[in-house]
Amino acid sequence: MTKPISILLSLLALARTTAAEPVLTIEAGKPAAHVSPILYGLMTEEINHSYDGGLYAELIQNRAFLDNSHRPVHWAVVENAGAASISLDTNQPLNEKLPVSLRMDASAASPTNPAALANDGYWGIPVFPSTRYHASFYARANASGPIIVTLAGNDGTTVYAQAKVKHIAAGWNHYELSLKTRAGFKPTDKAKFVLAVEHPGTVWFSLVSLFPPTWKNQPNGFRKDLMQMLVDLHPKFLRFPGGNYVEGDTIATRFNWKETIGPISQRHGHRGPWGYRSTDGMGLPDFLRWCQDMGAEPVLAVYAGYSLRGDHVKPGADLEPFVQDALDEIEYVTGPATTKWGAQRAADGHPKPYPLHYVEIGNEDWFDKSYSYDARFAQFYNAIKSKYPDIQCISTVGNEQPSERRVHSRQPDLLDEHYYRNAQTFLDDSAHFDNYDRHGPQIFVGEWAAYETPYVPWDSRSAKKPPTPNMTSALADAAWMTAMERNSDVVRMQCYAPLLVNVNPGARQWRPNLIGYNGLRCFGSPSYYAIRMFSGNLGNEILKATLDDSMLHYSVTRNNRTGEIFIKLVNPQSSSQSLGLEIKGVRLKSTGTAITLAAPADASNSIDDPTNVVPVRSKVTNVTPVFHYTLPANSITVLQFFILR
Ligand code: AHR
């Protein structure tokens, strides 16, 4: 077709639109910029029982008896069995790192009437039929006889699986058992883990552990269903270990990575800033394995000398040990096995170095009232760049913060900006990055999320709201993603936060969160599906597009290898909206695909209704360079068209 005729047809086609119909004009022939190849990633920290009681598949809560220094919380003597008492004992430590054991004194016990103690897990021990569990514990005893290990119902009579250790020796030994549940029952979390003795005497326990089958059957592994949900998001990076979690409330309770490596019997754990203790079962080696399993690269946050309650380490000599810790940490991640910390990584099971291109220096250092961040950043930056010139250093203070809080003495490679905003604010600000300086540092939107409440997520009223966002927030999240995607020449990386929430009562500290779960199952919020739709349909080039006068939000990209064009459209209005699409500069295949997430504004998913709001895939026919498409009310749409070559 010659050019004037095609223009005429375009005009005629658009003339058929109603006066109110907006038109999205797409220059599909030549790209405006490149899409960042690592735009979509994940942010994670120990919050809302993300790891312990979450992704980290350990089922025993307080496995090393360190959660409370007075009482063996989550452990209890089983009533109706023989007679026993339990107590914390610091006189029989397993080792320096696990200095407390659980002492069980059985005063009456027999094979028909054993004395027993039980762990109630993280809001129950989830038990599935015909499933093999791996139990292990350290124990020593002053009496002979077996230990019976049972996965039992809370009713006191149901037995799902049982196995026996024939004899416990007088000194500390490690015992491992396989527990295969029987068939023919409904999965339940109304269960407990029981250790029983058949003879009177004293037994000490340490590091009692129970794992279900894990992702790729790895020891010390991850929950399978949650890993699948994360993999389905196609993350290109994982930002860890926080967030506030890297900082800690105090310098002493920071994420001290050197305490999180080696076997779990050498990990003391620590108190995190979100009100509970972490086992550190999810340590640095495990974060790295997690990245690898998802095909994501690490974005490593290093402790930078500032903690949440306001302590800071003075730049200069005082800060030097922390800078050295960061250099050691980078060596642990990237160094060959011939280096000190590379050798440690190899000893921890991973001889091959991991890729590492991004290191974030601290977290939200704009809170540091001493204004020491510029100098602290500079000290880390100099040390890292001189040893690892290719590593990109991320400042935690972005353009959304006052200038006096930002780093000026160095040019950070990237700035981490955080946006927790009311849904309407995201919708109103979707041009946010359009005018960002293309010559300044690139942007890492390291935490963002819309909330549908009139108050901020950290307001105490949030505790009464559902743990995950509803469709109103998903629409705003999608609009915000179009803003970042359209500008992904400057927005290099972005990740929603927080990622995970255990939905059991008392488990969470924050809302909204992307993915919810209890011990038995998990679900994605509408925002989860929006991110999945976006990250799975990205392409590598940004196409210039203009939308006239509209309430809609858009981003258009193409894949120059496959010829796919991805048009992302968000209609946050409560009525459907017809849209004119004018795709210039290419010829298109006549059929395409639409993926649509549409639901009433207050609709959501939950643990009991996990798929109320999910995307629907449909065929689009009669695709022409100029055509009309109707976007449903409250909808997020990805149109996938194909360029004819
Ligand atoms: O995502 C929850 C918290 O919000 C993060 O830990 C912190 O960085 C931010 O303030």
Image: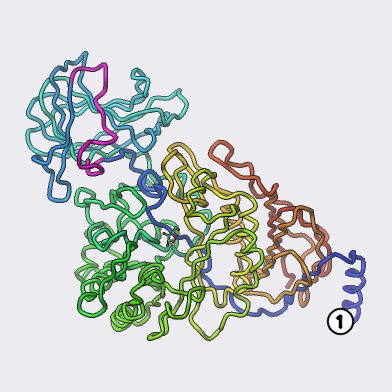
The residue under the point 21% across, 75% down is 318
The residue under the point 48% across, 39% down is 521
* Residue 438 rendering spot, x and y as whole percentages: 56, 83
Answer left or right for 248 relative to 54: left
The residue under the point 63% across, 77% down is 434
* Residue 560 rendering spot, x and y as whole percentages: 64, 73
- Give the residue at the far top of this rendering: 112
Quarter containing ligand 1? bottom left
* Residue 533 rendering spot, x and y as whole percentages: 61, 57
**Residue 298 makes an appearance in the image:** yes
Answer left or right for 40 relative to 68: right
Depth order, front residue of 5/118: 118
Residue 263, above or below 312: above
Q: For numbered disc 1, what is the local secondary structure? A: helix
Depth order, front residue of 18/367: 367
* Residue 158 rendering spot, x and y as whole percentages: 36, 20
**Residue 346 makes an appearance in the image:** no
| Secondary structure mainly formed by the magenta segment | loop
Answer left or right for 597 relative to 22: left
Which corner quadrant of the image does residue 610 belong to? top right
Which corner quadrant of the image does residue 170 belong to? top left
Residue 468, above or below 284: above
Residue 248, above or below 441: above
Answer left or right for 398 relative to 453: left
Magenta run includes residue 26: no
Residue picked out by circle 1: 3
Which corner quadrant of the image does residue 372 belong to? bottom left
Query: Which amino acid lies under the numbered mark 1 shown in the image of this protein?
Result: Lys
Where does the magenta region start and end? 63-83
Q: Residues within 10 Å of mark 1 (few under 14, many from 20)?
A: few
Q: How is the image coloured?
A: rainbow
